[in-house]
Amino acid sequence: MRKFIIAVALFLGFIFVVGKLTEIQSIAETLQRGIWWFLGLALVIEALWFINCGASFRAIYSAMGIEEQIGTLSLMASAAFFMNVVAPSGGVSGLTIFISEARRRNYSPARAAVAGVLFLLFDYLGLIAILLVGLIILIRRNDLTLVVIIASIALVALAMLFAFLLNLGMQSAVAFGNALAWITRLTNRIMHPFIHREYLSEIRAHEFAHDAAEGLSKMRDEPKNMLPPLLLALSNKVAMIVILTLVFLAFNIPISIGTIIACFSIGSLFVIISPTPAGVGVVEGALTLALTSMYISLEDAAIITLSYRGITFWLPLLVGMISLRFLEKVGIKPNSNQNGDINV
């Protein structure tokens, strides 16, 4: 079944890429016009971003009592990104990568899933920190729109929901289990008219909560362990800002730090608060509009948007496709210890 699912995901990825060939060709032609060493440096920063994602997961896993290599987690994070794009389901597709690998490597799938949610929470908090600066810049320039305000509120609300559930898990496995059971019942009611059976199991929800709460309690007992993933999440955003800056430099387009931060904030915001996976189509429009509102010509705005998305979206998508195949092909199987953790 695992091989079948991966084969389907790779096929969906192929169809997705084929459907966007015109856009990919435009990106390739645009990048050829830039100063190669600025673009090369941007690619190096993107590679470091992949490693930083693995380091973020490594810090979260370690805080929850699981030991895993940064390289392996970087591959898993990359494959999860690919899955979230080609099989969008609110991030659940990406979490299945971590759950599946946890089962294969003989450690807790529940803790792996919670680690994925924690990664998202820290990522949102890192973005919110940058977004606050971006909103101040937009207000000072009279460029703040109602759409951006609503999207920002939605991001903060989503981060607060994750924080509430995870804090619940840190405080009480029973309360966390009851919350997940309520979500399970609600999901089953929604799905029942379509499949005429229970879609999720309440018993498994409680089992999941109990296992996950054990890992979360480790973080509660040592709150200092939350600082490294938070700083790594913030450094991830700084890396993206550097890439956007390098893209401007590659095409000799005048910039200011305020423009960079404001445009990055809007683009990143709509990656998350978007009806399309990874903001496909939405981010391109929002970022181009943001750039033109800051007195950058439409042609230059289009060049920046295509190049930036080529490096930060299409390249990770390709790497994610390769990572998914690599994880399936290599499949390192570590020895487990008595605590159910692993040593790779």
Image (cartoon, grey):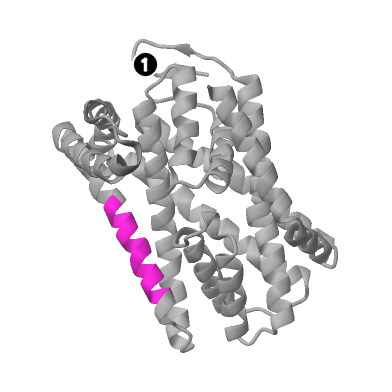
What secondary structure is the magenta-colored segment mainly? helix
Residue 253 at x, y percent in the picture: 73, 78
Can you say whether 154 is above or below 162 in the image? below
State the count of labels. 1
- What residue do we see at 44% from left, 82% from top? 144
Q: Is residue 332 above or below residue 53?
A: above
Q: Residue at the location (67% across, 63% down)?
A: 308
* In-image side of 75 versus 150 (left or right): right
Q: From the image, tell me which residue sits under label 1.
A: 340
Where residue 138 appears, x then y in whole percent? 47, 81
Q: Report if residue 248 is visible in the image.
A: no
Let me know if residue 43 appears in the view. yes
Q: Looking at the image, which is closer to me, 251 or 310?
A: 310
Task: Magenta stretch: give its range.
Answer: 148-161
To which quarter of the image does residue 39 belong?
bottom right
Amino acid under disc 1: Gly
Q: Quadrant of residue 113?
A: top left
**Does the magenta run of residues contain 69?**
no
Q: Give yes or no for residue 154 being in the magenta stretch.
A: yes
Q: Is residue 262 above or below residue 269?
A: below
| Label 1 Cα crowd, 10 Å radius (few <14 / some 14-19 / many 20+) | few
- Residue placed most toward the observer, 226 or 278: 278
State the image coordinates of residue 225 (x, y, percent, origin top left).
Answer: 35, 39
Name the side, left or right, on which 172 lies relative to 292: left
- Name the spot of residue 186 as percent of width and height, x first: 23, 44
Which element type, helix, strand or loop, lies under badge 1? Answer: loop
Residue at (30% x, 49% y) in the render: 162
Task: Answer above or below: position of 167 versus 154.
Answer: above
| Location of residue 116 by image quarter | top left
